[in-house]
Image (spheres, helix red, strand yellow):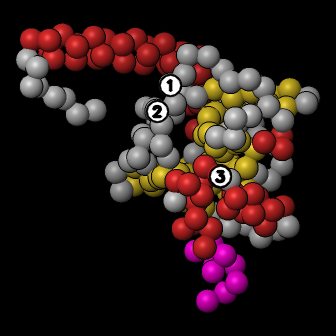
Amino acid sequence: MSKAQSLYDLLSEQVQDEESFDSGVSLEKWRELGENGVIIPLKIPLQGSSMEPLIRSRKDIVTVMPLVGDPMVGDIILFRRNDGKNIVHRVYRIFPDGIQTWGDNCQRPDAPRKREDIYGLIVSMEKNGKSYQLDTDKQRAYGIRWMKYGRMPWMVLQRIRLIFRRIVRSVYPDFHVDA
């Protein structure tokens, strides 16, 4: 087994453990390796609904590569928030001194952040046993269209579903609908 492969196995195990992923220790080392030319893809199961409907919490697995160059509007990136949490969101705006991101299922964009906060680029996703490339021009264009037009109907639909569930549960308390 090569040294790069053993590092990949070690980092993948650490990142998939929620505590290691949240602490960022393995991600810091992974980014450092990427900056030194050792490019190791990481597969990470995500937790949270901020990128739905594209990426489903605890169901879809994303592949992250170290960011080489600057991100583009529409790219999906992994970054560290000011509170220390690791987040996956889409690049919304690019400024001379940083970027602004926006989760597909969020009402507002995030606060602008520095380039140093970015760990990597989400290049693909595994959903229902199929792999989808997310770092293509077509996917970036889809992301830009989603940020402009798709977010509002999706959020209205989510609100309607929530209201419907509350009504059904008030009439049938034992009835449960899985998401």
Q: Quadrant of residue 96?
A: top right
- Marks 3,1: beta carbons within 8 A: no
Element at label 1: loop
Which residue appears at 63% of the width and 26% of the height? 102
Determine the CA span between mark 3 and mark 1: 25 Å
Where's residue 137, x and y in %?
A: 65, 40
Element at label 3: helix
- Marks 2,1: beta carbons within 8 A: yes
Q: Which mark is residue 105?
A: 1
Q: Which residue is mark 3?
A: 23
Q: Is residue 85 highlighted in magenta?
A: no
Task: Work out whether mark 3 precedes mark 1 in sequence or the reverse, and give the earlier one.
Answer: 3
Q: In the rendered structure, which amino acid carries the disc numbered 1? A: Asn
Q: Quadrant of residue 52?
A: top left
- Of labels 3 and 1, the one closer to you: 3
Q: Which residue is mark 2?
A: 49
- Of labels 2 and 3, the one closer to you: 3
